[in-house]
């Protein structure tokens, strides 16, 4: 395995600084059964341990005194919405029943499948009952407006759109099935000892099986011969030969920049829809922070305006929207005794929309001040370690196109057959895996992607 960064994991990485150990990107995940399937199919012992989150997370909305605590238990969840959404229990139950059917009618036909042609894709789509078709043509927000009357419930149950790196206004309604996955099917999970234990566990198993890891080595070119790639070349001109290559770099970016495919040249890449870019802050804080739970969202009271602007314009100065994870709450080793490790994620425009990040500290400090006000705890005075990563840092660390944190977006023109495929059209021995190929972004999707690519590679090597 040849890796550009100095250690494995990609976006699922870790940052050690000033005695703190931060999870750098993902802080929780759903669909844990996809990891079970991976472990089972590889016939290995689980190399890490999940912790199921209960409650799932809390949401603070500007102007609402009490945070909403999101539970899987429907009665406890209903209590949170008593003042806001009449008949909440009936409404959430109907929403979850609808999204449950959608999930089970689509997951095996679409999500867990390779597509060999457009015809094959449409044939698989026809197996999805017609009653779900309207969900292809409307966005997640309209679906939620049909399910709930209050702005609070609509905002909270549209957060799954942000998990895909877009807003509920840009996300097709079919992805509302993630509410079923989150609230009923599986919930959310964290890993004992921190998320990076996944990477340490998996690389440990691979090393035992003889896999060699070569770090600080970026692939920058390819040499073709008779319709196959004969060698990939790294930054120092060294050639790497193999029977087949599995590319975990962004599936669109790599085709354009390294394989030089015309359909993925810069002008074409620019026209694709890319997900938000992260501005991430890692804080080491002395003492306790009150009024925060493990996973916290802070939302303003101008959601529609915010959502319509956030990924295309400047970051909103008046009302920042952000996510805070107190990593030391689930993993005490993340911070020295008497300290807390905090991760803050501010969804931001990618580099096609916002190029100048010289204001990174200003943006970060504004959010830290806002958090101090909302928690009634002067965090600024307690900071002993601070790191801010802009979309440029994310781009440069992992070759993320324009700093886009989750890769290609998931509208219908970039889903299924229309997403960059996991095998190359031109070179028969090149395969892709990860967030920008099928089925999509997020840790469980990356795991499913690896299974689909493995099927392709095994077929290729047997020929
Ligand atoms: C801030 C942030 C928070 C997130 N939070 C969550 C979350 O809570 N839950 C969740 O499920 N998902 C989350 N995600 C999404 C999740 O991290 C990604 O979908 C997933 O990790 C993508 O994995 P991947 O293998 O496709 O790509 P990557 O993790 O990007 O791996 C690709 C690897 O290829 C290397 N590489 C690239 N180009 C080259 C090259 N030319 N030569 C050599 N090496 C190269 C990169 O350095 C990298 O290590 C988050 C993402 C971000 C950025």
Image (spheres, rainbow, N blue to C red):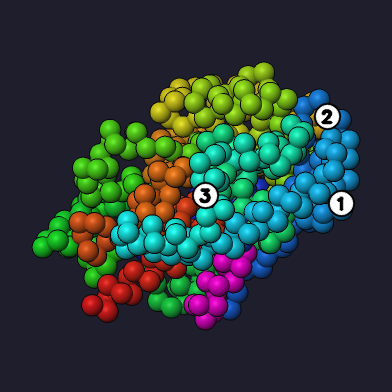
Query: Helix or strand or loop: what does disc 2 sit on?
Result: loop
For label 3, count other residues whose C-alpha is less than 10 Å away and answer few (under 14), some (14-19) or many (20+): few
| Residue at x-position 52% and y-position 81% | 43
**Disc 1 + disc 3, Cβ < 8 Å:** no
Residue 195 falls in image quadrant: bottom right
The verdict on residue 38 being magenta is: yes
Residue bearing the label numbered 3:
133
Q: From mark 1 to mark 3, how far is it between C-alphas?
A: 33 Å
Relative to 32, residue 176 above or below = above
Residue 457 at what x, y percent from top left?
Answer: 32, 70
Q: Which residue is mark 1?
A: 76
Residue at the farthest front position: 130
Where's the C terminus, which quadrant? bottom left
**Disc nearer the start of the sequence (2/3):** 2
Residue 198, by quadrant, is bottom right
Q: Is mark 2 within 8 Å of ligand 1?
A: no
Residue 5 badge: none
User: Residues in magenta?
Assistant: 32-44
Q: Residue at x 27, y 42 (%)?
A: 264
Counting the numbered discs, the total is: 3
Residue 208 seen in the figure: yes
Q: State left or right for residue 228 relative to residue 42.
A: left
Majority secondary structure of the magenta segment? helix
Q: Residue furthest top?
A: 318
Q: Nearer the viewer, residue 456 or 113?
A: 113
Vertical placement of residue 353 versus 135, above or below: above
Disc 1 under 8 Å from ligand 1? The reply is no
Q: Which mark is residue 64?
A: 2
């Amino acid at each position: 395995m040849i890796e550009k960064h100095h250690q494995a994991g990609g976006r699922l990485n870790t940052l050690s600084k000033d005695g703190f150990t931060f999870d750098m990107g993902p802080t929780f995940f759903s669909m844990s059964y996809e990891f079970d399937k991976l472990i089972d199919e590889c016939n290995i012992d689980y190399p890490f341990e999940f912790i199921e989150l209960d409650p799932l997370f809390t949401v603070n909305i500007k102007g609402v005194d009490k945070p909403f605590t999101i539970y899987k238990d429907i009665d406890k969840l209903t209590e949170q919405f008593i003042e806001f959404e009449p008949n909440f229990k009936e409404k959430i139950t109907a929403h979850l029943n609808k999204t449950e059917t959608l999930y089970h009618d689509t997951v095996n036909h679409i999500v867990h499948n390779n597509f060999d042609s457009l015809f094959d894709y449409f044939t698989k789509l026809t197996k999805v009952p017609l009653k779900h078709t309207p969900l292809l043509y409307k966005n997640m927000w309209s679906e939620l407006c049909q399910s709930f009357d209050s702005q609070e419930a609509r905002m909270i149950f549209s957060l799954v759109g942000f998990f895909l790196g877009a807003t509920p206004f840009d996300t097709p309604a079919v992805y509302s099935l993630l509410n079923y996955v989150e609230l009923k099917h599986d919930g959310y999970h964290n890993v004992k000892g921190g998320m990076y234990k996944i990477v340490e566990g998996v690389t440990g198993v691979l090393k035992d099986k003889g896999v060699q890891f070569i770090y600080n080595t970026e692939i920058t070119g390819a040499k073709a011969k008779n319709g196959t790639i004969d060698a990939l070349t790294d930054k120092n001109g060294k050639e790497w030969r193999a029977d087949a290559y599995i590319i975990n770099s962004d599936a669109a970016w790599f085709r354009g920049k390294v394989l030089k495919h015309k359909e993925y040249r810069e002008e074409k890449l620019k026209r694709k829809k890319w997900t938000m870019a992260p501005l991430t802050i890692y804080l080491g804080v002395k003492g306790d922070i009150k009024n925060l739970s493990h996973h916290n969202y802070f939302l303003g009271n101008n959601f529609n305006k915010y959502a319509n602007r956030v990924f295309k314009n400047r970051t909103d100065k008046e009302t920042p929207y952000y996510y805070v994870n107190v990593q030391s709450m689930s993993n005490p080793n993340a911070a020295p005794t008497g300290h807390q490790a905090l991760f803050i994620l501010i969804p931001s425009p990618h580099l096609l929309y916002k190029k100048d990040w010289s204001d990174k500290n200003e943006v970060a400090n504004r959010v830290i001040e806002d958090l101090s006000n909302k928690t009634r705890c002067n965090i600024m005075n307690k900071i002993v370690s601070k790191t801010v990563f802009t979309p440029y840092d994310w781009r440069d660390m992992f070759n993320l196109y324009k700093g886009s944190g989750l890769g290609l977006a998931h509208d219908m023109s970039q889903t299924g057959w229309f997403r960059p495929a996991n095998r190359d059209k031109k070179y028969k021995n090149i395969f892709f895996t990860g967030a920008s190929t099928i089925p999509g972004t997020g840790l469980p999707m990356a795991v499913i992607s690896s299974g689909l690519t493995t099927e392709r590679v095994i077929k290729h090597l047997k020929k």
